[in-house]
Amino acid sequence: MSAPIRVAVVDDEELVRIGLAAIISAAPDLTVVGEAGDGAEVPPLLSRTRPDVILMDVRMPRIDGLQATRHLLETRPDPPRVLMITTLEHDEYVYAALRAGASGFLLKRSRPAQVLEAIRVVAAGESLLFPAAIRRMAAAYGRTTPPARLTAREGEVLRLMAEGLSNGEIAGRLVLGAETVKTHVGNVLAKLGARDRTQAVIAAYESGFVVPGSGG
């Protein structure tokens, strides 16, 4: 049996932290390794607990989730995956954090099963969550950037990534082998300069390569 996914919870509301920790601890494949109440506490928390995934509140009193996320992604050689926690789908802080390298976001009203699945998804590297909401945020907050030079097949793969499809689902849709799709996804990320799938999809919408309403 593989080791459980190590999770840290960072939120200034104690009740939220307790609730999330209880939900996570009840899952046999997840474990809570630490908690913090502000972004300022994230560096020592990381050094002490070495989590695989951090649930990070967007708005905190001293250092918010955006600043904390940007700092850890810029300073850690092998940073944990970051799931932003927010009350609003259309949050400019969430969007900025996704552009900075966070892997996805959760709404505070999410059901327990959704929280657990989101943690598992980002821990596995399948970073895209709530693609429709990401699309709307890109339209609202995005900046126009030049499209990358993708091959026709890489373009097809990126459009399916924007629909929220996994590698396996893309392979089925395009009738390709799983390893071939994995190679295409890697090429797309490299050409876009994207850390993960979420950043790649944001870049696709911002550049106009994928148009809202065309899929996803």
Image (spheres, rainbow, N blue to C red):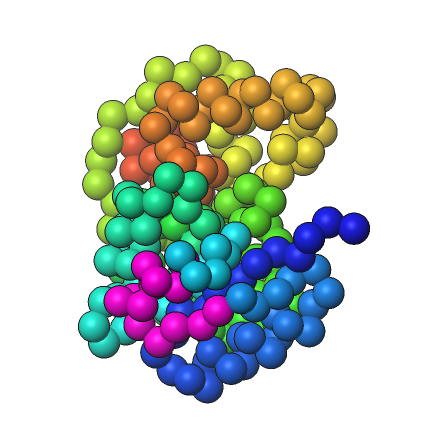
Please say whether residue 130 is visible from this viewpoint: no
Q: Which residue is at the front of the view, 184 or 31?
A: 31
Q: Residue furthest top?
A: 151
The residue depicted at 57 percent of the width and 58 percent of the height is: 6
Whole-percent x, y for residue 37 in the image:
35, 76
The residue depicted at 49 percent of the width and 31 percent of the height is: 159
Q: Which residue is at the front of the view, 67 or 72?
A: 72
Please give left or right for residue 6 compared with residue 213 in the image. Answer: right
Whole-percent x, y for residue 99 in the image:
31, 45
Q: Residue furthest front?
A: 48
Q: Which residue is at the front of the view, 51 or 158?
A: 51
The residue depicted at 52 percent of the width and 36 percent of the height is: 161
Please give left or right for residue 93 compared with residue 161 in the image. Answer: left
Whole-percent x, y for residue 124 in the image:
60, 44
Please give left or right for residue 23 compared with residue 54 in the image. Answer: right
Q: Residue furthest right?
A: 1
Query: Is 119 drawn above or below residue 202 in the view shown?
Result: below
Quarter of image, res 167: top right
**Which residues lie in the magenta part?**
34-46
Is-magenta flag for residue 207? no
